Image (cartoon, rainbow, N blue to C red):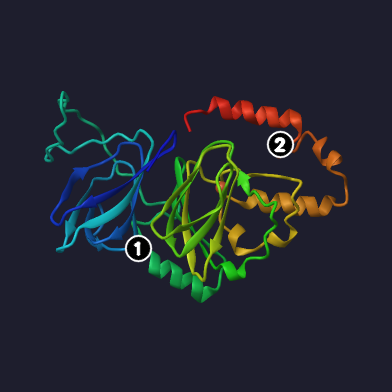
């Protein structure tokens, strides 16, 4: 589904009894969202468990794991790997056969990476949603917290969002793309160059690096998207000419990673009615670079051309 410089994702359907034998990734974390059937996970250091629809499972680097579809129905899972992840197999596991590929035995001082920084072997979406509803908190939860990949659970209702300006374009990221798996309900997307569309549960949406995008809860709800990027604390760049006063503090902006947008809004409020020129001339504000004036627009287009791989 996604294959860029940061993440590689795919849907995998498996027949009952199908097994993914023991393996591990030497440097990278892997995660799955089970969307159908039942999958038994065996993860080194954890009690085996059976995951079903809505379970979000992750394995840290250097941790041996295996999967098996159990029951009498096929399973479906959405798999996410860090781009170019390598896979190694323990010596008691026969590796898969590929044409013109032979396997070389190697030795390694392997120490499984811990579940740290808030990462857990699994989260169950229904439990996460119930906790958000109970606490009536704004819907931000981090499922994956890794220097090379992040997944945020963003949950809420369209009815709780403030009115949206027709000029709203959202933001864009200078370092990596953003992709979403719709976990529940519907999410409305404005993505630069595309007609506005509504994505449903199970859909995958992708916005390349440098591309304006704006995601909002849609429909009666609840709505939830799993937002994935290649970095924690990803920088979001917004159009300073659109004043978003009403948006500060609402649930759609409470997720980790979009704080820069809220900060920018607050700053604009403080500076108002200072002129835009005054803000623009403040060279220490890095996010003034990508404004739509002619000079910086050229900068942005140059950068976009350089990233044609996305
Ligand atoms: Fe974004």
Q: For the N terminus, give its image quadrant.
A: top left
In the shown orientation, is residue 89 left or right of residue 184?
Answer: left
Q: Position of residue 289 (x, y in %)?
A: 71, 34
Outermost residue, front side: 195
Q: Quadrant of residue 54?
A: bottom left
Viewer-nearest of discs 1 and 2: 1
Whether residue 174 is visible to the viewer of this picture, yes or no, is yes
Residue at image position (25%, 53%) is 45
Residue at image position (69%, 27%) is 298
Whether residue 236 is visible to the viewer of this picture, yes or no, is no
Q: Which of these two is toward me, 277 or 257?
A: 277
In the shown orientation, is residue 95 left or right of residue 214?
Answer: left
Q: Position of residue 258 (x, y in %)?
A: 60, 51
Q: Position of residue 56 (x, y in %)?
A: 35, 58
Under 8 Å from ligand 1: the CB of mark 1?
Answer: no
Q: Which of these two is toward me, 71 or 137?
A: 71
| Residue to which mark 1 is pinned | 54
**Marks 1 and 2, the one that precedes in the sequence:** 1
| Residue to which mark 2 is pinned | 286
Q: Which of these two is toward me, 81 or 162?
A: 162
How crowded is the residue under tag 2: few (<14 C-alpha within 10 Å), some, or many (20+)? few
Q: Position of residue 15 (x, y in %)?
A: 16, 54
CA gap between label 1 and label 2 equals 39 Å
């Amino acid at each position: 589904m996604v294959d860029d410089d940061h993440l590689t994702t795919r849907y995998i359907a498996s027949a009952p009894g199908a097994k993914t034998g023991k393996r591990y990734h030497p440097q990278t974390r892997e995660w799955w969202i089970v969307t159908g059937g039942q999958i038994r996970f065996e993860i080194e250091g954890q009690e085996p468990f059976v995951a079903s629809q809505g379970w979000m499972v992750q394995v840290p680097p250097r941790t041996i794991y295996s999967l098996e579809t159990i029951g009498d129905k096929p399973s479906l899972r959405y798999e996410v790997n860090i781009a170019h992840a390598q896979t190694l197999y323990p010596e008691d596991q026969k590796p898969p056969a590929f044409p013109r590929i032979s396997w070389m035995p190697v030795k390694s001082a392997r120490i499984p990476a811990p579940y740290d920084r808030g990462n857990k072997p699994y989260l169950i979406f229904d439990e996460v949603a119930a906790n958000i509803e109970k606490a009536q908190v704004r819907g931000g939860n981090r499922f994956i917290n890794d220097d090379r990949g992040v997944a945020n659970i963003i949950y809420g209702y369209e009815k709780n969002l403030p009115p949206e300006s027709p000029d709203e374009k959202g933001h864009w990221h200078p370092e990596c793309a953003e992709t979403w798996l719709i976990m529940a309900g519907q999410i409305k997307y404005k993505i630069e160059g595309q007609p506005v569309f509504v994505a449903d549960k199970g859909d995958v949406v992708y916005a390349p690096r440098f591309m304006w995008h704006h995601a909002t809860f849609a429909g009666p709800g609840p709505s939830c998207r799993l937002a994935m990027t290649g970095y924690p604390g990803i920088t979001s760049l917004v159009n300073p000419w659109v004043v978003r006063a009403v948006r500060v503090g609402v649930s759609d902006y409470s997720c980790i990673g979009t704080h820069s947008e809220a900060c920018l809004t607050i700053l604009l409020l403080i500076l108002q009615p200072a002129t835009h020129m005054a803000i623009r001339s403040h060279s220490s504000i890095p996010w003034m670079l990508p404004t739509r004036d002619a000079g910086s627009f050229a900068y942005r287009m140059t950068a976009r051309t350089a990233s044609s791989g996305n």
